[in-house]
Image (cartoon, rainbow, N blue to C red):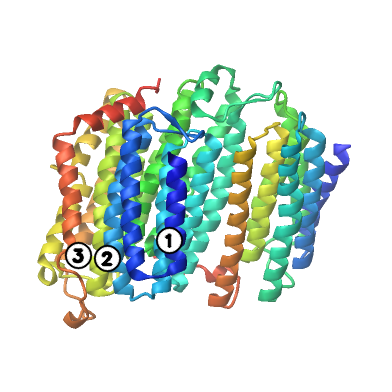
Amino acid sequence: MLLYYFIFSLLISLSILFFKKKKLSNSLIIVFLLGQIAITLFAYQNINQTDSAFFKFDALGILFTMILSILSIASFYYSRFYLDYKDSSIKNESYYYSLFILFIVAMTAANFAQNMAILWVFVETTTLLVAGLVYFDRSKIAIEASWKYLFIGSIGIAIAFIGILFISVVDIKNGVMALNFDELIQHTKQLNPLWVKISFLFILTGFSVKLSSVPLFPASIDAKTVAPGPVNALMSTALINVGFITIFRFFVVFSHTDSFLWVRNVILIAAISSLIFSAIQLFKVKRYTRLYAFSSMEHVSLVLLGLYTGGIAYYAAILHLIFHSFIKAGLFYQITGIKQTYHSVWFKDSGNYFRIRPIDALVVLLGLILITAIPPSGLFFTELTIFKGLFLSNNIFIAILSLLLLTIIIYIIAKKIMHLLYGVQPKTYKETTNTSNKYAFIPVLILFALTIFIGIHPPHFISELINSSIVLLK
Amino acid sequence: MDYIFILTLAATLVLFALFERVKKFIFLISFQGVLLFGIALINLLHINTLELVLILLETIVVKSIIIPIFLRKMTIQNQLKRVHEVNVPVFYSIIFTSFFILGSFLLSSFLQLPNINSRIFSIGFASVIFGIYFIAIHKNIFSHLIGYLIIENGIFLFSVGVGSQMPLLIGLAILLDVLIGVLIIGIFVNKVKDRFQSIDIAQLSQLKD
């Protein structure tokens, strides 16, 4: 089925690129979105079934694809505002939509990839597509950001490939290669501990560009600083989920080896150093896009801490990603509104948003409450669980250090958002150039409401999918 | 027999450190493609015709012909002739490169990796390390692309060294992905040159807050 979905999406993408007709593009996007929803439902109905030789509809893949599909609809909706704001030509619009569709397809494929090499191929594909989308603005900083993302991303992925090579060769003497995750789990006893350790280092380093964690996070932060809002919303959520699913799949395999303690310690180092870096860097940021990008890095660190802690924290880590996806996407959609109002995303050009756009400001305030994990935010429950896990497993020093860093991060984020909401109105602001849409806040509000709802009353199918995802972990 | 190929490959790494002319970099990249084909042919056992075609496509067609032609076009378009801006003097670079090669061979003999072709593994490791070093010492993004290609060649050697033979379809997908990646990186080098009037990496520092 996935093969048909790929062909179908590719045809739609190519048609948009070649025909360059506005009405046709809009209709084709709707058709694509219907296809995206259909494949998500199909996957859910055929859970744990293998598809198109290299793919499998497993629980975590389904969960992340559900999030991706919901956010895709919202992203296309906001793309309209973004493109209108940019006053882009039909040629540029077609280029944008065409790449955007392929980007969503590549992420869907990566979510379901059961074969390591195929997973690698689609993650690399997302690098190429993101570079193209970041370049959309054609400005000097857009070229700089896309170059850095493309180059560092490609080198990272190349390094990850070495890790995949090392882990896949199970029995070299007889030429046995296990490229499927399921197959690899059965062969974990044959793996050489030294190779396991080296390969995990390579894999974590390589895919850290997608996960936005230490060591290769700068490329992803730079790309998020200039990427179009709707693209940014997916890069900071669905693409981070792809990065997570990639590392998580290897993590599950490594949990069956004797080197698991070592792997967990590496995860801990990555988590704590990411948290420290994001706290330090947040002092320096001067743009909202960069602020949100570092905030994503902070949440990824917490998710990695969840992986390190284990037990109930596994559940919390995945749930944390779901909440983070909805909230962060909402905040990035709001960026388009801020851009339309002030024509800038710099702190210095913003202020007094409550007076200028009261409803939008209220939504931003709600977003701030949710992203800083203040109840009723779902993130409050997940963070509580992760820290509870840390305390119970006697990692008191790590827990206190993380809480301290988190306090700094929350303080900076709140301070900057408060500046936007209540700060002095910038002299550069003109009512006449304010082009923001009155009703653009509605989908953001829906996403935020969804987060609160899932936090208070998680639907049964979500709990079931998360539990099935972590069942293989030892 | 593969000793000759491996030693020649090691020599190309030293030459990369020695040369400054862009034309010679492209020649070396092309030549490495031929050497990779030789090494793969000798070392991959149980090879069937389709796999042979894939390797031929990967090494000779892509690495020795398509990418060098593309790079050549790029240098003509951007009028690149010589790479002046190197952070480390050539003499030291040659010493470092020799250390990388020697170090890799010593490391693999020290680790005594079971069932691995340690000669190929060593030169692959040296290529990856040298590629990263090459990127670090050069200040222009065209040389960074060359560094990336050296790393890619190193990874190809790794895959031969561990005896990995990917299924044909996956091999093709990887090859296509890498090729498109290199072409897009190349296109971005052109974009940077057009927009910044230079390919110096120092120009690309406006994003910092």
User: Which badge, 1 or 2, comes first in the chain's sequence?
Assistant: 1
Position of the C terminus of chain B, as image quadrant, is: bottom left
Q: Nearer the viewer, mark 2 or mark 3?
A: 2
Helix, strand or loop at mark 1: helix
Q: Which mark is residue A419?
A: 3
Helix, strand or loop at mark 3: helix
Residue under pointer 1? A98
- The answer for how far apart the CA atoms under marks 2 and 3 are is 18 Å
Crowding at label 2, few (<14), some or many (≥20) Cα neighbours within 10 Å? many
**x and y percentages locating residue A436 in the rendered image:** 20, 71
Q: Is B54 rendered above or below residue B48? A: below
Say which quarter of the image contains residue A445. Answer: bottom left
Residue B92 relative to residue A419: left or right: right
Specify the subunit that label 3 lies on: A
Q: Nearer the viewer, residue A435 or A264?
A: A435
The answer to whether mark 3 and mark 1 are in CB contact below 8 A is no
Crowding at label 3, few (<14), some or many (≥20) Cα neighbours within 10 Å? some
User: Which badge, 3 or 1, comes first in the chain's sequence?
Assistant: 1
Q: Nearer the viewer, residue A244 or A61?
A: A61
Specify the subunit that label 2 lies on: A
Residue under pointer 2? A336
What amino acid is at disc 3?
His
Specify the subunit that label 1 lies on: A
Q: Is residue B21 visible?
A: no
Q: Is A12 rendered above or below residue A53? A: below
